[in-house]
């Protein structure tokens, strides 16, 4: 009864339907997508469609109510392009696959902490070029303590800036700082990947491409598609377990560090809740 729907779901982000990879899963959701994929063949980008699926009574896989799927074909890609996209999505959601480099560009930003509060200097050429495709880690001082793993919770002093030099969060306030505990399974992938393997006591300047940060989502005072720069001091770690492994930006909301310690109430190291 379309005049009295029991459930309406609206997606703001495009879903990908792989036409050449039908699933053998007989569940109603996969069956629906397989049927829809076949019906889209031959249609052009820009086509608007509606697909109605009658109710299903299935004692094995569960009953399914009537569904009306309405959408627009916004793009298409080859199988190779699809595979590349899948690979990139894994890298942007899994810190263990996030590329990290210590090779520094000639125009790398610098940080000064002599005043007691970190101050960033970002060359215009770096602002124009952006961070690039990998997380860049400039090790200002090596640590001598235990090495950090992706399953750990780390204690850090930190400040974060946009490429234009705007500071969006900091654990420093009035020249003083209190270490903030951050579980690496609750932070953006670029942050977790940058911490991985460094020892307690290390001081790092970390530059994170937007795709390993918040991507196309605006978060607090951080605009969407923003490359990020962090100065980080690793002051301690608490060992985690394999079940605590960081899994990426989609699961990274919860650590709000700005309200208690920083200049802003932005949740700087997680995603939207």
Image: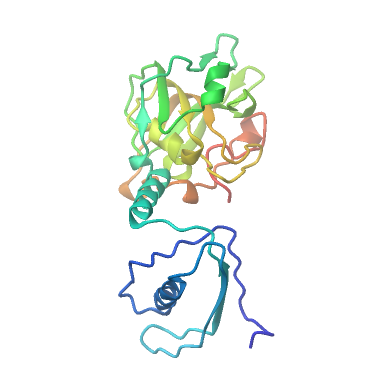
Give the image location of residue 109, x and y in percent: 51, 17
Which residue is nearer to you in this view: 203 or 78? Answer: 78
Give the image location of residue 55, x and y in percent: 50, 88
Rendering quarter of residue 177: top right
Which residue is nearer to you in this view: 37 or 106? Answer: 37
Residue at image coords 56%, 23%: 127
Give the image location of residue 15, x and y in percent: 49, 62
Q: Considering only vertical position in the picture, is 199 above or below 1?
A: above
Q: Is residue 248 visible to the viewer in this orientation of the structure?
A: yes
Which residue is nearer to you in this view: 139 or 108? Answer: 108
In the rendered image, the residue lying farthest to the right is 3
Give the image location of residue 59, x and y in percent: 39, 89
Q: Is 63 on the left-hand or right-hand side of 224?
A: left
Q: Considering only vertical position in the picture, is 226 above or below 242?
A: above
Q: Considering only vertical position in the picture, is 74 above or below 245?
A: below
Rendering quarter of residue 72: bottom right
Q: Is residue 122 visible to the viewer in this orientation of the structure?
A: no
Which residue is nearer to you in this view: 158 or 236? Answer: 158
Colouring of the image: rainbow
The N terminus, quarter of image: bottom right
Residue at image coords 60%, 10%: 115
In the rendered image, the residue lying farthest to the top is 114
Residue at image coords 50%, 65%: 44
Q: Is 170 on the left-hand or right-hand side of 155?
A: right
How many discs appear? 0
Q: Considering only vertical position in the picture, is 126 above or below 74?
A: above
């Amino acid at each position: 009864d379309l005049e009295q729907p029991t459930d309406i779901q609206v997606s703001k982000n495009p879903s990908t339907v792989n036409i050449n990879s039908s699933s053998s899963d007989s569940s109603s959701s996969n069956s629906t997508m397989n049927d829809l994929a076949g019906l889209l063949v031959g249609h052009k980008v820009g086509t608007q469609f509606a697909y109605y699926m009658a109710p299903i009574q299935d004692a094995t896989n569960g009953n399914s109510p009537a569904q009306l799927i309405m959408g627009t074909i916004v793009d298409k890609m080859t199988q190779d392009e699809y595979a590349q996209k899948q690979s990139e999505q894994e890298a942007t959601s899994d810190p263990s696959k996030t590329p990290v480099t210590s090779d520094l560009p000639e125009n790398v930003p610098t940080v000064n902490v002599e005043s007691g509060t970190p101050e960033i200097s970002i060359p215009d050429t770096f602002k124009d070029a952006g961070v690039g495709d990998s997380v860049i880690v400039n090790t200002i001082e090596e640590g001598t303590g235990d090495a950090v793993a992706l399953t750990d919770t780390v204690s850090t002093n930190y400040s974060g800036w946009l490429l234009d030099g705007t500071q969006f969060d900091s654990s420093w306030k009035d020249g003083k700082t209190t270490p903030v505990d951050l579980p690496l399974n609750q932070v953006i992938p670029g942050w977790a990947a940058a911490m991985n393997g460094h020892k307690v006591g290390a001081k790092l300047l970390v530059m994170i491409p937007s795709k390993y940060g918040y991507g196309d989502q605006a978060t607090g005072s951080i605009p969407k598609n923003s490359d990020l720069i962090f100065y980080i001091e690793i002051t301690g770690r608490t060992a985690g377990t394999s079940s605590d492994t960081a899994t990426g930006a989609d699961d990274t909301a919860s650590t709000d560090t700005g309200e208690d310690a920083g200049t802003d109430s932005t949740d700087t190291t997680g995603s939207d809740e």
